Amino acid sequence: MKTICTSFDFHTAGEPFRTVAEPPVEIPGESVAQRRELAVPGSALDDLRRLLCFEPRGHADMYGGFITPPDDDGADFGVLFWHKDGFSTACGHGTMALGAWAVSSGIVEIDPSGTTEVTIDVPSGRVRAQVHTDAEGRAASVDFVNVSSRLVASGITVDTSRGPVSVDL
């Protein structure tokens, strides 16, 4: 049986990122977070990750993402991030690559203002890539707003072999 898997490769912030818009295997789960939990070693999805990530198609520093449906109508799409060790909850350079991919492929319509927002559901929450386009409508730069974080504790002293260090959690 012949299986075809099309990918789009990006070099983003010094790192590779491979986007698979239509994975040729089923991705079970109701949310992006649940899909990540179900992407276990030995599953068809994990086998595909390994095929795309390791030699001869990839390398030890390869990153990528399988496009999935979003969790709800508030996002443009979802993604399962992957790398040589498995599936991760987030990927900054991958988010930027996905923003550029969504605009260049027409998944998200370019905003005439020159800044297009691409909303992506990731296992850790929802991120927003801001794609800045040039006069020809090509992605010129991308930045993003990550999932929210919060301060749990401030000014905690931790004793280290080099002396005490003040940290925030």
Image: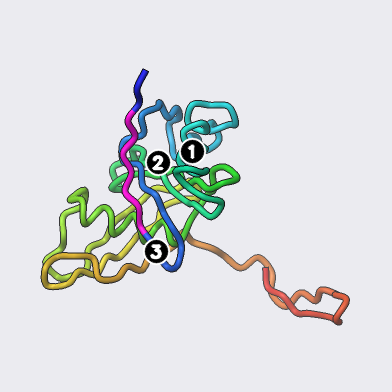
Select label 1 or label 2 by which is in front: 1
**Residue furthest bottom in the image:** 163
Name the element at disc 2. strand
**Real-space Cα distance between discs 3 and 1?**
19 Å
- Across and down, in percent, residue 169 comes to 67, 68
Residue that numbered label 2 is attached to: 66
User: Which image quarter: residue 116?
Assistant: bottom left
Q: CA distance from mark 1 to mark 2?
A: 9 Å
Name above or below for residue 43 compared with residue 7: above
Residue 66 shown in magenta: no
What is the CA distance from the residue labelled 2 to the residue labelled 3? 17 Å
* Amino acid at circle 3: Thr
- Report if the CB atoms under discs 1 and 2 are less than 8 Å apart: yes
Q: Secondary structure at mark 1?
A: helix
Residue drawn at the location 56% of the way across and 46% of the way down: 84
Q: Are marks 2 and 3 in contact (CB under 8 Å)?
A: no
The region drawn magenta spans 4-10
Marking on residue 12? 3
Which disc is residue 49 wearing?
Answer: 1
Determine the image quadrant of residue 137: bottom left
- What's the residue type where badge 2 is placed? Phe
Nearest to N terminus: mark 1 or mark 2: 1
Q: Amino acid at mark 1?
A: Arg
